[in-house]
Amino acid sequence: MKKSVGTDIEFPKETCNDKDCPFHGNVSMRGNTFSGKVISAKMQKTVVVEWSRKEYVKKFERYLVKKTKVKAHNPECLDVKEGDNVLISETRPLSKTKHFVVLKKI
């Protein structure tokens, strides 16, 4: 059984009662999906995901490496840890700073 979120994501084997889970709750995916590394998992049901990107600087004719850090909801059924590579997707605002949800471990 697969869920349609723009990519072929399989349902996790574990179940959860989390209302903000994209598989067992009522949160729909929209917008972009990103893959990054979990750099912090100290908050309850929240992880901080970071990925790098290159930005061209016309004046110096070189590229800068910039990092993006976002907070994402960590469902109980996935339970990702620090150091895991994950796929996250944009969703409706879940809190003041949380607008992403973890879809799977890579």
Image (cartoon, rainbow, N blue to C red):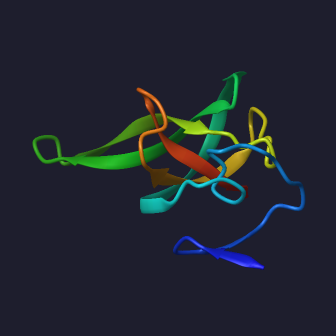
Q: Seen from this angle, which residue lies furthest left? A: 59
Residue 5 sits above or below residue 62 on the image: below
Where does the image place residue 15, in percent across and percent down from the top left?
85, 54
Near-viewer residue (1 or 9) = 1
Q: Quadrant of residue 38?
A: top right
Is residue 1 shown left or right of residue 9? right
Where does the image place residue 49, in percent across and percent down from the top left?
57, 38
Is residue 56 shown left or right of residue 40? left
Q: Quadrant of residue 79?
A: top right
Q: Seen from this angle, which residue lies furthest right? A: 13
Q: Say which quadrant the C terminus sits in.
A: bottom right
- Marker count (numbered): 0
Residue at 52% x, 74% y: name it.
6
Is residue 97 shown left or right of residue 26? left
Q: Seen from this angle, which residue lies furthest top? A: 42
Residue at 10% x, 42% y: name it.
59
Residue 42 sits above or below residue 33 on the image: above
Q: Say which quadrant the N terminus sits in.
A: bottom right
Is residue 52 shown left or right of residue 14? left
Where does the image place residue 68, in percent across and percent down from the top left?
43, 37
Residue at 42% x, 40% y: name it.
93
Residue at 63% x, 42% y: name it.
37
Where does the image place residue 41, in percent across and percent down from the top left?
70, 27
Q: Quadrant of residue 26?
A: bottom right
